[in-house]
Image: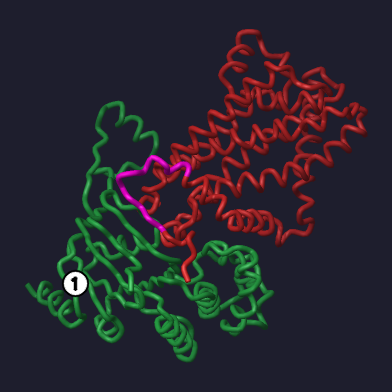
Chain colours: A green, B red
Amino acid sequence: MGYKIRLANVSVQYRMPSERIGTLKEYIIRRIQGRVKHRKFFALKNIDIEINEGEVFGVIGHNGAGKSTMLKLFARVLPPTIGRIEIMGSVSPLLELGAGFHPELSGRENIFLNGALLGFSREEMRKKFDSIVDFSGLSAFIDGPIRTYSSGMWARLGFAVATASRPDILLVDEILAVGDEEFQKKCFDRIDDFKNNGTTIVIVAHSMQTIQERCSRVSWLDHGELKFIGVPEEAISAYRKSQNN
Amino acid sequence: MSENRNIYIYDAKNKTAKPFEELRQAYHYRYLISQLLRRDIVTRYKRSFLGIGWTMLNPLGTMIVLSIAFSQVFKMTEGYPAYVLSGLMAWNFFSQTTYASMVNLVWGGGLLKRIYMPRTSFALAAIGTGLVNTVLTVIPMLIVMAIIGVPIRASVLFIPFPLLLLALFSLGFGLILSTLAVYFPDVAEMYQIILTAWMYLTPIIYPEEILPENIHFIISTFNPMYGLVKLFRIPIFYGRLPTMEEFVFPAIIAILFFVIGWFFFSYKSDEFAYKI
């Protein structure tokens, strides 16, 4: 079975102005004076990872270790500064559900808008529409503007759109807190179903319990470097040991 | 399972193709662009009584106010409303689409951090919205022309060409502006002032004949909107086709701005994910 995600010697470098320059006027003045300095730092350094089909892959590390940067690489949002990245298949990010919804539009209109954001075509969305509404359980409210929805309803619709079709790779940031317990169970069932059908799942979480329960392999990032990659127990204990020191 | 289009390979060694890749992706995501366009138009009027009618009434209202105020001042009573309206059509397209490109990108920044989409989507949707709005204002403009007795000639059919050039210019300019706005939040504020000044430096509400010769030379040479607005006015107001010279210079400028804007934006946009 081939890999689904491969990072080969990947580094991501951020270039930030060393002092905060808030306005264009200030920038131009400083530029003329030759006082614009950039600080460069590596958010990720020389990362080599292969993630296989059907794997549940966890990423742990303290804040600022490069976890979200890694997720951005997988989501194709950020390209690496050095190295090569290969992603074999469709990626669906389950990050902040319903982030692209517009409050004035109806649930129906938002389903199409959000589906388009995820890269689906009109035909694909037409086919999926009924099953999305059905899964969200919001058919009674689907033509009302989404500003009238509760935050739970909002997230339910977001989840339903984001998981309308089985992606090859699913990115999960933190633990899902979607609506009530019953709906949460529905979400986890769907994710498990994806997994059983071969979807690769990448989880970034602070909760070690989630990582331990769900992941088959875990990588531990520290200051942008890959310190450990292997079974969850060992990764977690290595991470914990470093925190105690 | 995975179709060919879903394979993504990025090697930091070869990134020369970025602007072309962006173009390819924008085409691939055309449904998103049409959805964003739809959202712009629908949400703008959703809670208002007249709805889309405002698109037509807005320039018409401005035209009436300006006609009453200025037709005496400029001693150009004949056809002044049509003169203003044809100029406003071009100007409104430019100011609205460039401003919307910038605001939409900053608004959509949260999304760009999480989900992949062509980053030019917002600017392209803004241009699309502007095109729809402009087409809608053509109808009231023709009515005004008929009422005040400005002859409507077949040259009106030439309008898609200057509109296309204006769209290219606005897209290029809007992309440069959006990039700056990502780095410097004050650009949005500053741009509103610049737009006001720029409008007065372009013959929109006044006839260009009132300009002293040296100022006319400066404006017609260095203000790219001068030629583009004029290209709108020639087939509508003057009722003729533009000369080669009148067409080629604005066309070159529009294409140049489009290419520069697209390249500049494509290369800079990789940083957006951690700048916005």
Does A236 sit left or right of B25 as displayed?
Answer: left
Depth check: give the residue in front, B175 or A226.
A226
Which residue reaches farthest left? Answer: A245
Residue A112: percent from left, percent from top = 62, 67
Q: Is residue B120 left or right of residue A188?
A: right
Question: Is A193 situated above or below A98?
Answer: below
Q: Is residue B247 above or below residue B118?
A: above
Q: Where the N terminus of chain A falls, by quadrant?
A: bottom left
Residue farthest to the top?
B213
Is residue A154 in sight in this rendering? no
Across and down, in percent, residue B94 comes to: 63, 36
| Residue B133 lies in quadrant | top right
Can you say whether A51 is above or below B116 in the image?
Answer: below
Name the residue carrying label 1: A229
State whether residue A134 appears in this view.
yes
Where the C terminus of chain A falls, by quadrant? bottom left
Asked if the magenta segment contains residue B10, the reply would be yes
Q: How many residues crowd around disc 1 within 10 Å: few (fewer than 14), some, or many (20 or more)?
A: some
Q: Residue at x 81, y 25 (%)?
A: B237
Seen at 63% across and 75% down, the residue is A129
Residue type pointed to by label 1: Ile
B231 in magenta: no
Seen from the viewer's position, the closer of residues B263 and A108 is: B263
Residue B91: image x %, image y %? 67, 33
